[in-house]
Image (cartoon, grey):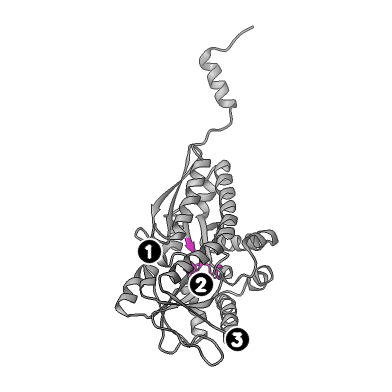
Amino acid sequence: MKFLKPAAFAALMSALAPAAYAEDVINAVHFAPAPSDFTQEFLRFVEAVNERGKGVVRIDVKGGPEIIPNPQLGTVQQSGLIDMIHTPAGLYLELVPEGEVLSASTVTPAEARANGGWDLLDSIYQAKGNAKLLAHMDASAGFHIWTVNEPKLTGDGMLDFDGILLRASPLYKQLFENLGATFIIQPAPEVYTSLERGVINANAYPVLGYASFGWDKFTKYRVDPSYFRMDVLISMNLDAFNALSPESQKIVVDTAMEFEQKSYDETAALAVKLAQEMVDKGQKVVTMTGEGKDRFLKTAADASWQRMESRDPTNIAKLKELFQ
C-alpha cells in the first residue's frame, strides 16, 4: 500500500477541511455618551457578542457622539465608514422616514417580528439606508416633556405650551408643530448648555439617560403621561453584514434578538426606578388630565403617521396594518 508523504497528506487534509474564516471585526459607534443608560445597555450587548464570538466575530466600539455627531450617524453607516450604529430611528429619518413607525407602534418588538412587520421595516432600511436592522431596544418605555418652570395646564387638562421654548429632536417635530408649540431642533450634547444659559426652558426626552446628561439639574418638572414608544435601534451597514461569515452573522443576530427581548422586559422597570430617583431629589410631576390628555396622546399618535405619509406613502398602508 502506497502512503502519501507527510507534506502531501497535510495538503490533502487542508483541502478537504471546512474553510477557515479569519475573525470578523465590526466597528461600532453609539449615539449617547458612555455613562448613559442607553450606552451601557449597548455595551453589554457588545460584551455578549464578543464573548460568544471569541475567535469568530468581535465588535470594536470606537466611541460615541464625540467620534461622530448624532446627525451624521445614518449617513456614515450608509457609506460604510462605520459598520454598526446604536441610535434612535428618530435620528435616521432623513434617510429612512419609515423608521418613525417604531415610535408610533402599538405592538411589541416580538409581535412585530411574528407578524412580518420587522421584516418589512428591515427591507425598507436595506433599500433606503443600506442598513441591516438587528434589534429594537428600550421599546417598553416612552418620552416625556420636562420643564424648568412649573408647567400650566389648559382648561381641558393638556399642557399649556404658552411661554415654553422646547428643545426637540427630528422625531418630535411634527407633533410639536401640530400642537402649536415653540421649539428648536437640537442634538443632545448641546442641551445642557442651552438649559444653563436659558436658551430653552423645556426639553423632550425619555427618562432613560436623562439624569446622566445632568439635565435634571435645570428641569425641575416632569410632565406625564409619556408619549411615543422609544425607538433605539442596533443596525449594521448591509454590505458589512453580508461580508460576515455565516457563523458570525448567526452570533450577532441571535444575540441581538435576545437583548431586544431582555431590553423590553427590563426597560419599563428601569424607567420607573430612574424617574423615582429624580423625584427623590426634588423633581415634581405634573400630569395632564381628561380631554386634554386624550387630545395630546391622539395628536402624538397621528403626527408620526402624518409625517411618514407626507414623505413617502408607498409603504404606509402595510406598515399601519402591521404596527398599529
Q: Residue furthest bottom?
A: 155
Confirm or deny contact between disc 2 and disc 3 (CB under 8 A): no
- Total labels: the figure holds 3
Q: Nearer the viewer, mark 1 or mark 2?
A: 2
Identify the residue under disc 3. 290
| Residue 151, visible in the rendered structure | yes
On-image quarter of the C terminus = bottom right
- Residues packed near mark 3 inside 10 Å, few (<14), some (14 to 19) or many (20 plus): few
Left or right: residue 225 versus residue 64 is right
Which residue is more in the foreground, 98 or 14? 98
Report, in whole angstroms, how far the alpha carbon at label 2 lies from the one at label 3. 19 Å
- Label 1: which residue? 69
Residue at label 2? 143
Which of labels 2 and 3 is toward the front?
A: 3
Question: Would you call the spot at circle 2 few (<14 residues within 10 Å), some (14-19), or many (20 or more)?
Answer: many
Q: Amino acid at mark 2?
A: Phe
Residue type, label 1: Pro
Which quadrant would the N terminus be assigned to in this image? top right
Q: Is residue 228 left or right of residue 31?
A: right
Q: Determine whether 97 is above or below 182 in the image.
A: above
Q: CA distance from mark 3 to mark 1?
A: 40 Å
Label 3's element?
helix
User: Of callouts 2 and 3, which one flags the residue occurring earlier in the amino acid sequence?
Assistant: 2
Residue 188 place in picture, x, y as percent: 39, 69
Q: Which residues are magenta?
A: 87-100
**Residue 124 percent location from the top left of the image:** 58, 63
